[in-house]
Image (cartoon, rainbow, N blue to C red):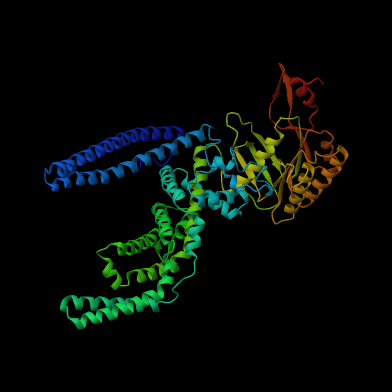
Amino acid sequence: MIDSPAVHPDLHAEYSRRLALHEQAAARWEKLDARFADLRLIVFGLGLAVAGNVYLADYPSAWWLGLPVAAFVAILLAHEPIRRRAERSARTIDFYKRGLARMEDRWAGTGVAGSNFLDVEHPYAADLDLFGVGSLFERLCTARTKAGEEALAAWLLAPAPPDVVAGRHEAVAELRPRLDLREDLELLGADVRAGIDPAALAAWGATPRVFPTSTLRVVAAALAAIGASALIAWLVMQDGERFLLLLLVLAVESAFGFWLARRVDRVLAGVDERAHDLIVLSGLLDRLEREPLQSSQLRALREALETGGRPASERIRSLGRLLHLLDTRDNQFFLPFALVLLWRTQFGMRIDAWRAENGPQIAGWLASVGDFEALSALAAYSAENPDDVFPELAEGPAIFEAQALGHPLIPRRECVANDVELGGETTALVVSGSNMSGKSTLLRAIGVSAVMAQAGAPVRATRLRLSPLAVGATLRVQDSLQAGRSRFYAEITRVRQIVDVSRGPLPLLFLLDELFSGTNSHDRRVGAEAVIRGLLARGAIGLVTTHDLALAEIVAGLGPRTLNVHFEDHFEDGVMRFDYRIHPGVVQHSNALELMRAVGLEV
């Protein structure tokens, strides 16, 4: 590991420095790896030459074969750690390359898209581009385990209570400068991701105990002690009477072992695979257990990795020792003694007892790892975007107040920021403007900021104050040929879902894009006004966008707390120009005809 200062004022430069160092180290390890591979080939060739002389020319002595064999084994043992270091360097290089890609806005399509978490029926997941290529999840996710991905996805899909968000802020702030920890999580987590199936592992741990009492363990231990005594007595005295006693004890042990064989088989079925998963996980757990942590949420996560005062990694190592001892039964020299000692039966019972004591904790260990990784992902985002701020969660009526709010997936140099105030004197905004002027992007920026804020992440703004909010959006409503649904029917179904959300425990932040655009202007206006009035009556706040100027007139019927705002555009040298900034009032013109003519349509 490369030593690092507590804080990196220029993280891009630090990533670049570490990348260069690891590339140099990788080149050295790869060169050494190639030399050892050549040396193995040379020694193998010499061994063949010696073997040919020994067996064809009968010269030199066959004992000389021991030299190339010993040299080959020594080279193999020395080569393996070199190969592992070369692989580690390659993975570390990839870690810093991806970090630089994120900071340089080249990350889309290079990370984990999280498409498996997308539910098109969710009130906002598809509308706000939470999952998929180029999504918020891909931008945020640095998790290398399935548990970490699942935790981060869950945080984005449901708002956390304010106290939990405050705890995550504290944890993220503590983890933000810990680049070494994130590097280690990357390397160890990659092994876990490749090596384990979390669901199968948790299910194995929750399997009911096969030997619920210790009675059979005591009987097995007693029989093993008697068998060992009978064997020793026969080996010392070697008379017929003691041999018959040994045979009698072995017969009893065989019957006992045969009686329990199926139950032992149930314990050991698949145990090698599950235990291997746990042993891979133990390296990651051990790293987390050794990290000094101060925030209450991080300490709670680490405490969850302890059972009865013993760390999870230590408990897993004890299982590893049991399995190692069980495997000694396969040694042909030890096998006779293993039969006398009921080796397989006794260790099957001990492994069952280990699972009974520790198995129910496995799901909790995985959950703690997942939360650690999710917090680390938010910390990486915070470190790579130091200008983004932690939001303030306020109790009371619905409120969303943002200064210089931007969208985190738009490159910062291209992102135009706007101030938005909802709640208090203004509960809703009707946003008019021409196509491509920025209306939908504003809705997404507001929605994504609310989601990130309530997940515990910093947001793209200079200040954000909001109350706990449920989010509902209609930005990506689509028709469905398979379901036989038109776009309009899909939209009114989604709007009904959002109305239902507004009746829930949290105030609603609604983001309605081109509301009811699939029907005529009269029905659109009447329906939109009725829906928005109902939402506002239930304490909701939000925005409605439109390029239909007639819809902007509904503000008059919604009262003084609903305002019209708009985005402007103009043609300049035959090119449509936008400033992407919010202006008060209703837009005064449309660019549709100009755009049609610009692409060559005769209108």
Q: Residue furthest bottom?
A: 241
Which of 6/117 is in front?
117
Left or right: where does residue 97 sit relative to residue 219?
A: right
Q: Is residue 78 above or below residue 101?
A: below
Q: Is residue 72 above or below residue 261?
A: above
Location of the C terminus by quadrant is: top right
Q: Position of residue 265 (x, y in %)?
A: 42, 68
Q: Give the number of marks.
A: 0
Q: Position of residue 61 (x, y in %)?
A: 11, 46
Q: Is residue 35 above or below residue 67?
A: above
Q: Position of residue 268 (x, y in %)?
A: 41, 65
Q: At 28% across and 73% down in the image, what residue appears? A: 340
Q: At 73% across and 25% down in the image, what residue appears? A: 569
Whether residue 426 is visible to the viewer of this picture, yes or no, is no
Which of 529/268 is in front?
268
Which of 567/94 is in front?
94
Q: Residue furthest right?
A: 522
Q: Position of residue 152 (x, y in %)?
A: 55, 49
Left or right: where does residue 124 sit relative to residue 298?
A: right
Location of the N terminus by quadrant is: top left
Name the image quarter holding residue 583: top right
Whether residue 401 is visible to the viewer of this picture, yes or no, is yes
Q: Residue furthest front?
A: 56
